[in-house]
Image (cartoon, helix red, strand yellow):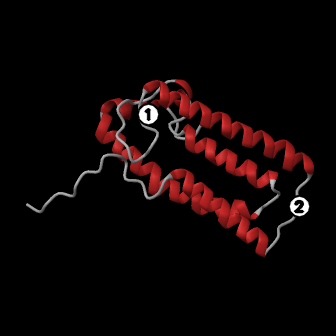
Amino acid sequence: MPPQPEQTRGADVVAPPPLIYLGGIAAGFVLEVLLPSASLPAWLEYGVGGALALAGLLLARGFFRALGRARTTISPYGESTTLVTTGIYRFSRNPGYLGMTLAYVGTALLASALWLFVSLVPVLLLMEFGVIRREERYLVRTFGAEYDAYRVRTRRWL
């Protein structure tokens, strides 16, 4: 029988999610400097952009609070000790990533930097295949039927 790969403690994601989002923002701003995009109307830039950025921050706050109350790790590299299904997790299986995505879009609008929307596409693909699916496999291994039941009743994003 061939040797089994060593099991990692956490979800074995490709990179820390905040760095993935920050990398996308940086790439978008580089493109914006090289090829400036069009300006946005003030209502879209400040009104919608500000609202989305604020919503993202509030979701992130709910994410930190829910995991803190459950006394489980926020790191995808750490061992999850509790399956959190309360608080913001009643509505989304990934409230932290949803919050980061909303903050990203809000930042793009606030900065009137449309290239950030182009760089958001690879960010979301990397999150899906390099983070979320790996985390979900880890959670199935760790919590089994309990996670399967949660996954059936709760949407991934909203």
Query: Do labels 1 and 2 touch, CB within 8 Å?
Result: no
Residue at label 2? Answer: 39
Looking at the image, residue 5 lies above or below residue 47: below
**Label 2: few (<14), some or many (≥20) within 10 Å?**
few
Residue at label 1? Answer: 152
Mark 1 → mark 2, Cα distance in angstroms: 42 Å
Q: Which is more foreground, mark 1 or mark 2?
A: 2
Outermost residue toward the bottom in this view: 34
Looking at the image, residue 54 lies above or below residue 39: above
Q: Residue at x 83, y 57 (%)?
A: 112
Could you say where residue 72 lies in the image, as x and y percent from the top left?
Answer: 41, 32
Q: Secondary structure at mark 2?
A: loop
Q: Secondary structure at mark 1?
A: helix
**Label 1: few (<14), some or many (≥20) within 10 Å?**
few
Q: How many marks?
A: 2
Give the amino acid type for the residue marked by disc 1 in the picture: Val
Snapshot quadrant of residue 73: top left
Give the amino acid type for the residue marked by disc 2 in the picture: Ser
Quadrant of the rendering where the N terminus is positioned: bottom left
Q: Residue at x 81, y 56 (%)?
A: 111
**N-terminal label among 1 and 2:** 2
Q: Residue at x 50, y 24 (%)?
A: 86
In the image, 133 versus 12, the foreground residue is 12
